[in-house]
Amino acid sequence: MTTPLEPTYRQGVGYQALLLGGFSTLATALLVAGNIATKSDIQERQREDLLRSLNQVIPAEYYDSDLLQQPLSIQDDQGDSLTVYRGLEGMQVNALAWEVVGQGYAGEIRLILGVNAKGEVLGVRVLSHAETPGLGDKIEIEKGNWILSFNDLSLKNTTTQQWHVKKDGGQFDQFSGATITPRAVVKAIHSGLTFFEAHKDELLNPPVINTKSVSLSKQASLPEETSHE
Amino acid sequence: MSNEYRRITKDGLWDNNIVFAQALGLCPLLAVTGTATNGLGMGMATTVVLVASGLFISLLRGIITPQVRIPVFVLIIAVLVTLVDMSMNAWIHDLHKVLGLFIPLIVTNCAILGRAESFASRNTVMNSMFDGLMMGVGFTFALVLLGAVREILGSGTLFANAAQLLGGWAKIIELTLIDDYRGFLLIILPPGGFLVLGFLHASKRLLDRRLAERKQATADAQTSEMPLESS
């Protein structure tokens, strides 16, 4: 291909095999080195990202603890494991945040939902979605204030009928040209709050300090020590 | 030598443009060009990989035999893309959040393998890197153009969210061209990508033909009133 003066040893299978094997080994070594060099930084960045989204949905005055410490692992209604991050003030669970998922127009919409101990929404943000740009993406905080309309709502101050978009007889605006997306978000948040009501005791149980085991199973529910104001 | 560079530049930007002439790399192209900003991001990331693959493949061209060249090229490109992806994720995380989606797509861009095979494997290191740069700039140009047309027609804006990619100063190039535009969904969705790409291809052909005709016309000035065939 390149030069007519190619040495004959290059035609041998041995050289070719050595070349391929050598490059594969080299490639593997490079990737391993790259992985080692970047792994801890990438984890740190992901931690920062998570903390940033948690801080958006739980105001700082609700906790004096580390939000990422001792997250609660709990089974959701589908039997999947769900990680709930808790903000503590003293020994009391004051705010919680977890991920809820809605089925949008183009796949899953992942949201992070923050609620206080009374089950009122502190904040909701979109983590990821694949909705149509310019139509469905108004659920992002960068594109509009729509997502803020959930703040302070709860199952108590908003009826089940109101937990719908206006087109379906509820109280939330849909977007022109996109109803499926806001409908999915409303439904996801509503089922998140329903989940909170159903598992309230378990969720508000303060974490046991100085133990490694953070996952409290449903059977071993500890005595309720905190009183909710 | 400068002649050589001029030819490479012209090839990369226009005559042999990855998108408009070679029609390569259309899969990532159509996927990301919903907005001009996304096109720019993808173009820049691809340019970096093109230059780097030009460097390494031309460096190694002496020891790679024709029989095993394709797997070796693929291996080199895949390693490069993965390393770029990992280091961006670790050290320029904000940019990675915007471009992260596109970077793995670069591996699927056969234009990079195409340049490795047809240029870098038979040219000097400097020429290969320069070719990678020019091909990358040409690719970026095509992506931004396609993204801009789709964005203007589809959402009435231009360079929306450029600040996320380029930093705060880029706010000034974020334009809303049509206020209260209700959107033209088809153009934003993949079929719109195919349609716009087709029209752009046709425009380039038309432009090239016009240029060639004008050249022809000036070359033989005595027959300048050459009847043009209607297109």
Image (cartoon, coloured by chain):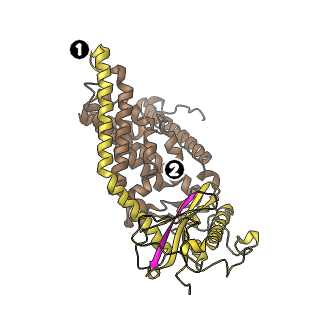
Q: What's the magenta region?
A: A78-88
Q: Residue A132: which quarter of the image?
A: bottom right
Where, by quadrant of the figure, is residue A77 drawn? Answer: bottom right
The furthest residue to the top? A8
- What's the CA distance linking mark 1 and mark 2? 47 Å
Identify the secondary structure beneath mark 1.
Answer: loop
Relative to the observer, which residue lies in front, B190 or B149?
B190
Q: Can residue A24 be seen by looking at this rendering? A: yes
Residue pictured at 67% horizontal, 68% vertical: A174
Which element is circle 2 on? loop
Chain for numbered disc 1: A
Q: Which residue is mark 2?
A: B33
Residue B6 seen by the camera: no
Residue B205 lies left or right of residue B195; in this view the side is left
Q: Badge 1 local density, few (<14 within 10 Å), some, or many (20+)?
A: few
> Which residue occupies the extreme right position in the image?
A169
The disc label shown at residue A7, or none: 1
Crowd band around label 2 with a 10 angstrom C-alpha radius: few (<14), some (14–19), many (20+): many
Q: Is residue B168 above or below residue A104?
A: below
Q: Chain of mark 2?
A: B
Label 1 close to label 2 by CB (< 8 Å): no
Taken as a whole, is the magenta stretch helix, strand or loop? Answer: strand
Residue type for callout 1: Pro
Amino acid carrying label 2: it is Thr
Res A113 quadrant in image: bottom right
- In the picture, one chain is brown; tell me its letter: B
